Image (tube, helix red, strand yellow):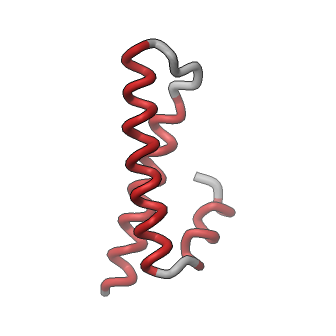
Amino acid sequence: MSKKLVEEMKKLNKIKLSEELDNAVKDLFTFRTQASTGQLSDVSQIRKTRRKIALIRTLLKEVKI
């Protein structure tokens, strides 16, 4: 994760973070489907998306506390 992305995510409110989480989960599903059918050329997208999901979930927990 780039520091720039982390800082951008920290500035978002709870609603925007939830929307970003939904989009990231959908992207992860798409990437996994493409990887299983051999259509995904950049397999590292799966790992990046999983890390993005983890970051968003962490930030949502921080907001909750």
Depicted 50 relative to depicted 43: above or below: below
The residue located at (58%, 19%) in the rendering is 41
In this rendered view, identify the residue nearer to me: 53 or 22: 22
The residue located at (41%, 54%) in the rendering is 53
Is 39 left or right of 3, judged from the image as shown?
left
- Percent coordinates x, y for residue 31 in the rendering: 45, 32
- Percent coordinates x, y for residue 16 in the rendering: 50, 73
- Percent coordinates x, y for residue 52 in the rendering: 48, 53
Q: Please count the marks in the image.
A: 0
Is 10 left or right of 56, judged from the image as shown?
right
For the view shown, which residue lies furthest in the top direction?
Answer: 38
The part of the image, by quadrant, that contains residue 60 is: bottom left
The part of the image, by quadrant, that contains residue 18 is: bottom left
The residue located at (39%, 56%) in the rendering is 54
Depicted 49 relative to depicted 8: above or below: above
Depicted 14 relative to depicted 27: above or below: below
For the view shown, which residue lies furthest in the bottom direction?
Answer: 65
The residue located at (55%, 75%) in the rendering is 10
Depicted 46 relative to depicted 9: above or below: above
- Percent coordinates x, y for residue 23 in the rendering: 46, 54
The quarter in which the C terminus is drawn is: bottom left
In this rendered view, identify the residue nearer to me: 61 or 27: 27
